Amino acid sequence: MNAQTLAKRAYAETATTTRTARGIEYQLLASVTHRLKSAAEAGPMAFPKLVEALSDNRRLWTALAVDVADAQNQLPPDLRAQVFYLAEFIQKHTSKVLNREARLGPLLEINAAILRGLRNKAPEK
């Protein structure tokens, strides 16, 4: 093996992909949404998996609420307020789903709408 090959291999092992905050948010939201759908489609026997996915979705939305509540957040104030409201709704509706008093559909619809918004935004500079 020559020095050039060793250098390429060493560099490749340490190189990482740079992701934007929006890209990370998209990936996390897509993952939890997929898990919610899969657990719901698996039926009543998969309720423990649904509970786990709902808990992760709730934590993700809590993090989003904390982020938009920060005075340093650069989103427009109206959008920040809307995200915060959605986070509150997610918390309350998740409790109803866990108590089997409401359907999962609204949570999936909200996540899908946010995913569309994240995907369609112009790239960060």
Image (spheres, rainbow, N blue to C red):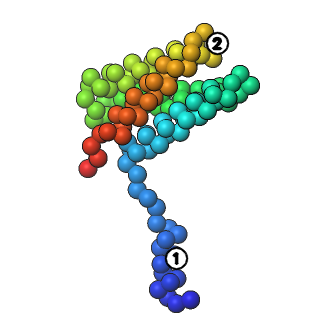
Quadrant where the N terminus lies? bottom right
Quadrant in the rendering for residue 100: top right
| Whole-number angstrom distance, CA of label 2 to CA of label 1 | 53 Å
> What kind of residue is marked 1?
Arg
Seen at 27% across and 23% down, the residue is 78
- Pointer 1: what residue? 9
- Of the residues under marks 2 and 1, which one precedes in the sequence? 1
Rendered location of residue 77, percent (x, y): 26, 25
Q: Quadrant location of residue 32?
A: top right
Is residue 96 found left or right of 24 in the rendered image?
right
Residue 93: give x, y in percent of width and height: 52, 15
Q: Would you place residue 4 above or below residue 22 in this image?
A: below
Question: Which residue type carries mark 2?
Answer: Asn
Tell me if residue 47 can be seen: no
Using the rendered image of the protein, determine whether residue 34 is visible from the camera's viewpoint: yes
Q: Residue at x 32, y 39 (%)?
A: 120
- Along the horizontal axis of the image, is 16 left or right of 78? right
Across and down, in percent, residue 80 comes to 32, 26
